[in-house]
Amino acid sequence: MANPESKQLFDKGIDALSEGKILAALSCFEKAFAIEEDPLISSFFAFCIAKERGDVQKAISLCNAAIKKEPENSFHYLNLGKIYLLKKNNKEAINIFRQGLSYEENQQIDDELNKLGTRKPPIIPFLKRSNIINKYLGMILSRLKLR
């Protein structure tokens, strides 16, 4: 970030975001974005737009633009993945998180992936996971707390 005013607003937005104050963070990122269209500002601004305003499509396009400008910055992937989680698209979110980790280590991405958890292997390994036998056996064994 070249502009000191946008840097100050960005830092204030990050603090608000870490405290869970999405609306305050949105305000800071929006002002910073108006001053300077930095990819990092754009990425965090996009997450706040999706979370607070529900404008997921605009948020995805802002994050994708940030990734095109700085493909090695894992925070863009973190924010895009969180947007996909808001959209209830866990599969795409996991793919995005993994892409971000391929560029650099990011503890926040690791935390998000750990929250999502891992799937257990199918009950009958030679059948597909989507096979009705695997599905129902898995559900029954889970309810009986045997799995």
Image (cartoon, grey):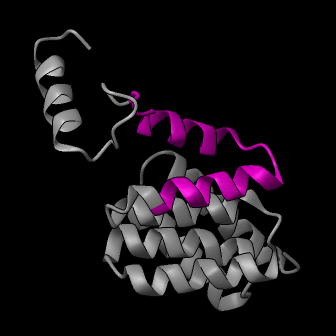
In the rendered image, the residue lying farthest to the front is: 126
Taking 1 as reference, is 76 above or below it?
above
Up the image or down, 93 lies above or below 123; here it is: below
Q: Residue at x 30, y 25 (%)?
A: 123
Residue at the spot x=62%, y=72% of the render?
A: 43
Q: Is residue 4 above or below residue 121?
A: below
- Residue 30: horizontal and vertical position, in percent? 55, 81
Q: Position of residue 54 (x, y in %)?
A: 31, 76
Q: Is residue 114 left or right of residue 86?
A: right
The percent position of residue 47, horizontal first and vertical second, equals 49, 68
Which residue is more in the foreground, 135 or 81?
Answer: 135
Q: Position of residue 2 (x, y in %)?
A: 88, 79
Image quarter of residue 126: top left
The N terminus - image quarter? bottom right
Residue 84 magenta-highlighted: no
Q: Which quarter of the image is occupied by the C terminus?
A: top left
Give the number of callouts: 0
Magenta residues, start to end = 92-121
Q: Give the side of residue 86 with respect to residue 33, left or right.
A: left
Q: Main secondary structure of the magenta part?
A: helix
Q: Is residue 118 magenta?
A: yes
| Residue at x 60%, y 54% (from the top left corner) | 97
Q: In the displayed image of the protein, which residue is found farthest to the top?
A: 146
Residue shown at 75% from the left, 82% from the top: 68
Most foreground residue, 117 or 12 = 117
